[in-house]
Amino acid sequence: MNKHWAAMVDGLRDEGVLSPEWEEPFSKVDRVYFVPNVDKHRAYELAPIVTQRSDDRRSLSSSSDPIVMAEMLQALDLERGQDVLEIGTGTGYNAALLAHRAGGAHVLSIEIDPSVARMAVANLTAAGFPEVAVLTGDGTKGYAGAGPYQRGIVTHAVSAIAPAWLEQLAPGGVLVVPWENTLMSQTILRLVKLDDGTAKGWMVGECAFMWDRAQDEPIPHVSIEDGRAMTTRIPPHYFGEVASIDLWIADRVPGLHMWPLNGPGSDLLFTRGEKWAVLEREPLRESWWNVCTANEPLWQDIEDALQAWLDADQPSYKDWPVTVAVDGTVSVQTGVQVDGGSRV
């Protein structure tokens, strides 16, 4: 292990995300094999590395931040010999870490992009894990042919749990997945499958993963000129960045969704059915922002929900239980604390 690699492992340990059972995989699987076109020093940075971009330079595939990878792998509670389904192979680095822990023949990974899948196979082979099975296809369908799996892990953000992932998970099995709520912040769910086919769990951390390409939704069209202006003291950075706020508001304003109106960093569009409001990114004056809305009560509902969170002493998403229905719908019970006995 070179000094840069050792520094990466030390950094994970310092971040408190490197449990003893995962220290060996991170110390034995060299990340440099999975980002071959990147400077070797940069390959060991505790940061994501983009490996594929679209023609308009949008990030399409990457090697995730090792800190978040370690946090998710720790939540998986993976034991030697357990069968694992990974959704989103990417570079293959995460699959290699899984293979080192569980055994290569116990890891099956699905990648939607054929070129990315081919690259992952080459990377895995070069790193000494040729036995990892990499399939090309729609990850939302899983792969029943090798199930049931004792563990499942998803490496991109989703808005709902694909029913196939729960169907192909053994009862008592664990699924770890980055979930994006309707106000666009992301949390890592740790779910346990129950005998009735549903799942329960909690959120172990916040994250910022690439979105599942299969779940892209068009931004609704609204006529700004038809709205009326009002002002608010709620800053735009409260939304899409603080999971506790987003989840609390979404729970109290059912059906609320948010989009960046013109891409990342732009004004924020909120919709609830036919009702909408746009929160401008640039302040009108110090501590005041413009809101354009076709329905004043919608924005008032949002403000009231935020005030309720503040009045409740700003509770954390980590305390709230999560349930998943058979159809994959995720529900968060804000204001209800996770029972210590349910953290299995």
Image (cartoon, helix red, strand yellow):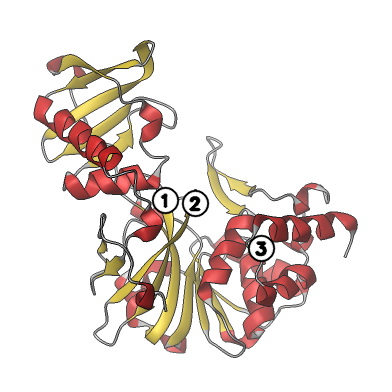
- 107 up-or-down from 42: above or below: below
Question: Which type of secondary structure does the marked residue at label 1 adopt?
Answer: strand
The x and y percentages for residue 229 are 18, 14
Q: Amino acid at mark 2?
A: Cys
Q: Amino acid at mark 3?
A: Met
Question: Which type of secondary structure does the marked residue at label 3 adopt?
Answer: helix
Rendered image: mark on residue 268: none
The x and y percentages for residue 134 are 57, 75
Q: Amino acid at mark 1?
A: Gln
| Residue lying at 17% horizontally and 44% vertically, measured from the top left | 253
Which quadrant is home to the N terminus? Answer: bottom right
> Which circle's residue, 1 or 2, is located before the other in the chain?
1
Dot 1 crowding, Cα within 10 Å, few <14, some 14–19, many 20+: many
- 262 up-or-down from 343: above or below: above
| Front residue of this view, candidates 237 and 316 | 316
Dot 2 crowding, Cα within 10 Å, few <14, some 14–19, many 20+: some
| Residue lying at 42% horizontally and 83% vertically, measured from the top left | 173
- 138 up-or-down from 199: above or below: above
Proximity of marks 1 and 2: CB atoms separated by less than 8 Å: yes
Give the alpha-carbon distance from disc 3 to disc 2, as whole Å: 25 Å
The x and y percentages for residue 142 are 41, 75
- 35 up-or-down from 200: above or below: above
Q: Which residue is mark 1?
A: 186
Q: Which residue is mark 3?
A: 119
Give the alpha-carbon distance from disc 1 to disc 2, as whole Å: 5 Å
Left or right, 144 with respect to 247, comes to right
- Residue 29 visible, this orientation: yes
Rendered image: mark on residue 207: 2
Q: Quadrant of residue 313?
A: top left
| Residue lying at 44% horizontally and 64% vertically, measured from the top left | 177
Left or right, 91 with respect to 189, comes to right
